[in-house]
């Protein structure tokens, strides 16, 4: 599970994001059909939570749950045309998200296939860093890589480094994993490409691309505060270094450049032409397809040149490697995308959309944002994200579309992104590392550092409120 995409986005959309569209809601929250819809969603989500124990992929219960909820919507709705329109709006929400994520996953898979991440890991392994340096280096790299490569992929990459270098140091591995999870989630919070929640907020038009960087300093504090506390408990000394050599496959650096160009195309198309971000990502998939064609057509000449060099040097190992080289095929990375995750997103979007059409999200919005106030509601959303996956939480907030200030939209984005760090099960990065570092990083090992992580959570919120008051982005509290 090397992307969420990380991981974890068919049609062209109007320049106004779909999530911003107004859909007439039913008032069915006190009907039998409404109660049944809530019951179906709760049961489906409980099955998702028990995915690891049940050995049942999370997309299956959500797909069935979405189907049953919309069946109930169709039964209770008096207007079939309005129901069809509501379903179509939610389905378009999913297609835009799915196509965006699919392209991002494809690029990440292509970079993995070209051994980009293996080379980075090998460089870190052979440097012979001390435990304290390794702790900070993996955390800082997780913080700055996750805004581009997504928090899940980044966390798994850094965890692989720690497991390789610090073998046998269970306590240190657990602390590094906690630090990596917090750093990856914090780094993903100030970029539309860092997490699914930030991507949804950007595509919904609630926060513009450059405005996400207003969350940079709060995100730094969210990572740095617990890291500074944990720093005092890092063991002295350094692990044994390894001499691991990894050779990048042909075209690896150019694929990284094409990925950055794809991101630039998505951002510029959205900022200056009003086109949805998925437009730039699909153009970027075209970049990768043409480059794959170039790699395939020039492969025979490249292999012949390398084979002559290996024969002159009598490098038997290189000759054996060259004999196993296969052409790059862009559809292999596409096939390796996390389809279970993408279908899970479909289920989440349609379940939440169906409950919203029945009127439940408006009811929750009144309780949260009108009852508690926007600031406390945002703080609560972050805490809820530590228990319930932040994707349905954020999509529900976007569907509620509360009348809050721009500063509070940024605050909700921040808390939903970093709130998952409070518990190991609160984010995809944490769940993935519990599997990758099984026996070292556990729910309880993460829970021991909850006070330090919570201090970082509070510090990030206070920092954003302070910056927001200076910038004047909070026009109401």
Image (tube, helix red, strand yellow):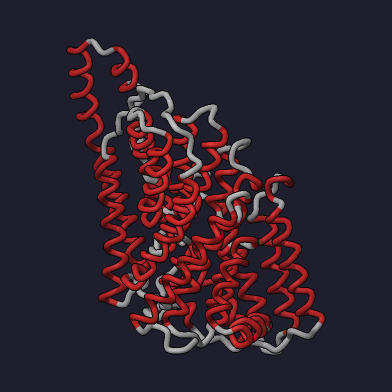
Is 235 left, or right, of 49 in this rendering?
Answer: left
Q: Residue 80, percent across and down?
A: 66, 85
Q: Residue at x 36, y 84 (%)?
A: 472
Q: Residue 282, percent across and down?
A: 35, 61
Camera-side residue of 30 and 379? 379
Q: Residue at x 79, y 74 (%)?
A: 36
Residue 269 to residue 407: above or below: above
Please identify the quarter of the rendering in which residue 445 is found.
top right
Q: Could you tell me how many numbered marks the image carries?
A: 0
Q: Is residue 6 visible?
A: no
Is 122 left, or right, of 462 in this rendering?
Answer: left
Q: Residue 26, percent across and down?
A: 67, 88
Is 37 left, or right, of 115 in this rendering?
Answer: right
Q: Residue at x 30, y 33 (%)?
A: 248
Camera-side residue of 330 and 340? 340
Please identify the quarter of the rendering in which residue 371 is found.
bottom right
Residue 99 to residue 351: above or below: above
Q: Residue at x 63, y 35 (%)?
A: 439
Residue 143 to residue 281: above or below: above
């Amino acid at each position: 599970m090397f992307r969420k995409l990380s991981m974890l986005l068919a049609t062209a959309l109007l320049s106004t994001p779909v999530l911003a569209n107004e859909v007439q809601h039913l008032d069915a929250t006190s009907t039998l059909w409404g109660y049944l819809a809530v019951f179906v969603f709760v049961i489906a989500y409980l099955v998702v939570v028990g995915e690891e124990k049940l050995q049942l992929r999370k997309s299956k219960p959500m797909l069935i749950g979405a189907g049953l909820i919309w069946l109930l919507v169709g039964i209770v709705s008096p207007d079939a045309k309005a129901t069809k329109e509501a379903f179509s709006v939610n389905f378009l929400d999913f297609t835009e998200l799915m196509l965006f994520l699919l392209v991002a996953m494809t690029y990440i898979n292509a970079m993995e296939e070209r051994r980009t991440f293996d080379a980075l890991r090998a460089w870190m392994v052979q440097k012979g860093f001390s435990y304290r340096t390794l702790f900070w280096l993996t955390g800082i790299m997780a913080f700055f890589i996750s805004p581009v490569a997504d928090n899940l992929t980044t966390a798994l990459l850094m965890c692989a480094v720690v497991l390789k270098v610090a073998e046998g140091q269970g306590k240190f591995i657990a602390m590094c994993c906690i630090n990596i999870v917090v750093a990856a989630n914090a780094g993903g919070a100030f970029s539309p490409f860092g997490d699914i929640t930030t991507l949804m907020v950007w595509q919904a038009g609630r926060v513009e691309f450059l405005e996400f960087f207003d969350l940079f300093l709060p995100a730094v504090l969210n990572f740095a505060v617990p890291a500074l506390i944990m720093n005092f408990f890092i063991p002295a000394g350094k692990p044994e270094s390894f001499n691991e050599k990894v050779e990048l496959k042909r075209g690896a650096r150019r694929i990284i450049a094409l990925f950055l160009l794809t991101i630039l195309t998505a951002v510029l198309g959205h900022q200056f032409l009003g086109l949805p971000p998925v437009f730039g990502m699909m153009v970027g998939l075209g970049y990768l397809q043409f480059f794959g064609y170039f790699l395939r057509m020039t492969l025979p000449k490249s292999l012949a040149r390398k084979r002559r060099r290996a024969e002159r040097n009598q490098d038997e190992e290189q000759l054996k490697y060259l004999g196993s080289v296969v052409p790059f095929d862009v559809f292999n990375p596409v096939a390796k995308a996390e389809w279970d995750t993408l279908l899970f997103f479909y289920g989440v979007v349609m379940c939440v959309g169906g409950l919203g059409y029945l009127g439940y999200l408006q009811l929750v919005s009144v309780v949260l944002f009108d009852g508690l106030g926007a600031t406390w509601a945002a703080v609560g959303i972050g805490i809820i994200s530590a228990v319930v996956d932040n994707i349905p939480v954020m999509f529900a907030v976007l569907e509620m579309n509360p009348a809050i200030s721009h500063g509070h939209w940024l605050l909700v984005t921040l808390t939903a992104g970093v709130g998952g760090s409070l518990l190991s099960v609160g984010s995809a990065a944490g769940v993935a590392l519990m599997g990758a570092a099984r026996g070292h990083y556990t729910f309880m090992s993460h829970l021991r550092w909850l006070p330090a992580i919570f201090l970082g959570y509070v510090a990030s919120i206070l920092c954003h409120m302070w910056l927001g008051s200076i910038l004047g982005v909070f026009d109401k509290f």
